[in-house]
Image (cartoon, helix red, strand yellow):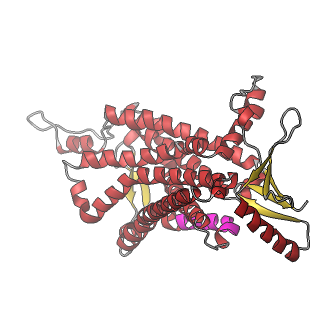
Amino acid sequence: MAERKEIVATTPEGGYSYEDEWWEMNCSIIPPEFNRLMLVGVVGAIIAFISVCFNTFLFVVLCRNPRHRHSHLIYLMFLSVADIFLSAAYILLFPVNLYMDYFNSELLASAWWAYMRIMITISHVFISTSAFLICAAAFERYITISKIACQFARHHRLIIIVACLCIAIIAKGPMYFEVEVVPNANCTGVTSLTAIPSEFSESEPYKTAYKFWFRNLLTVALPFIMCFYLNFAIMHRLRIQHLGAKLFRFATSEHRQNIRAATLMLVAVTCSYLASNLLNVVVYTWELVDKESLLSENIRPLYTLSSDLVSLLTVVASACRLPIYLVCNARIRCEVLDYVDNCVLTHFHIKPYTGLGSKRCRATTVRYCDTGSGYMIYDAPNKKGERRVRSVGTGLDRVVLSVAMGSIKASQTTDHLTVPLNNSLMLIQEE
């Protein structure tokens, strides 16, 4: 327990003096409520730990394939890194803070106060970075399905990712200097230290112009509005393409299905981001309109609960990304199953599961043959060495492709042309 360093005199009537009241208010430990302990200290810690494991596994799987470094999946690769940091920071900040009060642990308290400032900064920087990465991936997906000619977004993905991180550091990096850890008067033990706002963070125009308007608009309102608009626009384009696919059979080819799967996966990721940040936008709007009412005696418990839920929902969204990828994207699902079979199960001498493995997708080679058949899809050989060949497209497709290949033959000096095909490569070869 926290102990007083001074002997406190009692009043003549035997009651508590002013020093006793001050000590009870500033130095006594207030144990966390049971519901908050279960929500943050147990449920939140478990979900955050699952998020760290899922995203670490996802990062390893995506890094194993060099092709992902030159595709749109590089956004998901760095998004998993951001999720790892923010989930780990959640565990170190919120559950540990409750544990040190609940167990009255001076060891946890000293450790928590030592890393509190840097962990708060890291968590906020990577929360903003993940929001910006989702916006960048959604924008690229939108221009892809809209067939807008914008090569910068596709050829300079690393520059966009670094820009997202730099903007997040500019917006959230100064948070490290906005809080100071100082001794808590004569208190000892768990309550020996306290946090206070730094002097420059309360000065104008930094407090109003930068902290409240610039930071919140850039990292909360703007990503939410952009993701909402892009998500709506992407779903609208998908609906149009789905209706057109009924009239033009080539639109349902494997290439189109891969694009559609990647788009639906990103739509699901964006929806999870919007759902997890909706409460954050509501709280921010309330703070913008009437912040003093949130600190009133009646509303403050709800404000505290809302703040806990905002952080918890962010971690939940991070933990849901791997299941979303597995459900929506067959290529990622195949790579995950291959990694589990080849690395995990083999290491523990467990027989690989072949129920889904026998149907896993492989990179498809597409060749154009000058036989009047148009596009030919050559599937991977089966166990007998047989290779299945499929013709894709209608008669009109073959006429158009014949004209196109004639133009390519006249303009190209080489015999092979490599064309991007979602996550793999499509090889068009004249035979």
**Furthest residue in direction left, as rendered:** 13
- Relative vertical location of residue 23 with respect to residue 343 in this rendering, above or below: below
Give the image location of residue 4, x and y in percent.
Answer: 31, 39
Pinpoint residue 141: horizontal percent, then vertical percent. 59, 62
Name the quarter where the C terminus is drawn: bottom right
Instruction: Please state if 345 lies on the left or on the right of 212 as rendered.
Output: right
The residue located at (84%, 71%) in the rendering is: 406
Q: Residue at x 55, y 52 (%)?
A: 264
- Whether residue 49 is visible, yes or no, is yes
Tell me what residue is drawn at x 19 percent, y 39 percent.
9
Task: Tell me residue 236's x, y (percent).
Answer: 48, 61
Horizontal relation, residue 238 to residue 255: left or right: left
Name the magenta segment's main secondary structure.
helix
State the residue in front, 173 or 413.
413
User: From the viewer's perspective, is 363 left or right of 185?
Assistant: right
Q: Is residue 302 left or right of residue 255?
A: left
Residue 270 is covered by the magenta coloring = no
Which one is in front, 141 or 259?
259
Chain part drawn in magenta: 154-169
- Expressed as whole percent of the image width and height from the top left, the position of residue 101 reads 38, 36
Across the whole image, how many numbered discs are drawn on residues?
0
Q: Relative to residue 384, is residue 310 depicted above or below? A: below
Q: Is residue 44 above or below residue 169?
A: above
Visible in this render: residue 188? no
Q: Nearer the viewer, residue 220 or 415?
A: 415
Quadrant in the picture for the N terminus: top left
